[in-house]
Amino acid sequence: MPDPPSYLVQLTADADARFLAGSFESARALYLEAASDLDLADWKAELGQAPGRPELQAYALFRAGLASLRAGDTLGALALLGRAFSEHTTTLHGVAAAVYSAELQQGRPLPAACNSVEAFLQTRATEYAAIWEYGFANPEHTIGGLCR
C-alpha cells in the first residue's frame, strides 16, 4: 500500500491512475480533492520556482469534468469545466477547460472538442511542458494526453 501523497502533484497522479483504470467516480473524487487541497505541499514552490498549485488545481477540475463525462454526467462535467476557468482564468488548464466546454456547448463531439484544446495548447507547447516538469520519477503529461 503506497503512502498517502505529500505533494499535490502526487495526488493528481493518483487521480490520473484511477482515471486511466476506468474508475471515473473515484478519479473524480480525487481530482476534486486536489482542486481544493491547500495542505499538500507545492513541490515547485518549495524549490523556489513559480508555484505549481494554480495549474494543478485547474488541471484537476478539468480532469474531474472529463471523469464526469465518462461517468455519464454531462451537466456536472460542464459545471466543473466552468469552475476550472472561473477559478483559474490565468492558467493554461483553465483556458483549455473553457475551450473544451465551449466546443461541447456548441454540440461538437468529444474528439472535436479535444482537437480544439490540443490546437490551443500547441501554440503554448513550451509553457505546457514547463508546467509538467516534475522530474523523471513522475508521470509524463503531454498535450495529446490531456483529454483523450
Image (spheres, helix red, strand yellow):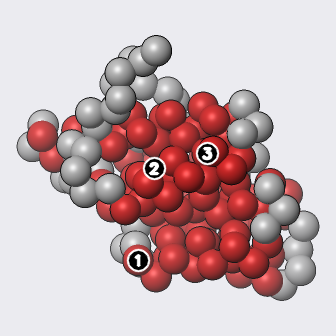
Q: CA distance from mark 3 to mark 1?
A: 20 Å
Q: Secondary structure at mark 3?
A: helix
Q: Nearer the viewer, residue 137 or 33?
A: 33
Residue 3 lies in what quarter of the image?
top left
Compared to 70, does 82 lie above or below? Answer: below
Identify residue for label 2. 128
Count of numbered badges drawn on the protein: 3
* Among numbered discs 2 and 3, the one appearing first in the sequence: 3
x, y (%) of residue 99?
A: 65, 74
Question: Which amino acid does the dot numbered 3 rest on?
Answer: Ala
x, y (%) of residue 7?
A: 28, 37
Residue at image position (88%, 74%) is 108
Question: Which amino acid does the dot numbered 2 rest on?
Answer: Tyr
x, y (%) of residue 73?
A: 79, 67
Identify residue for label 1. 87
Residue 81 lies in what quarter of the image?
bottom right
Residue 75 lies in what quarter of the image?
bottom right
Q: Secondary structure at mark 1?
A: helix
Q: Nearer the viewer, residue 40 or 102?
A: 40
Q: Nearer the viewer, mark 2 or mark 3?
A: 3
Q: Nearer the viewer, mark 1 or mark 2?
A: 1
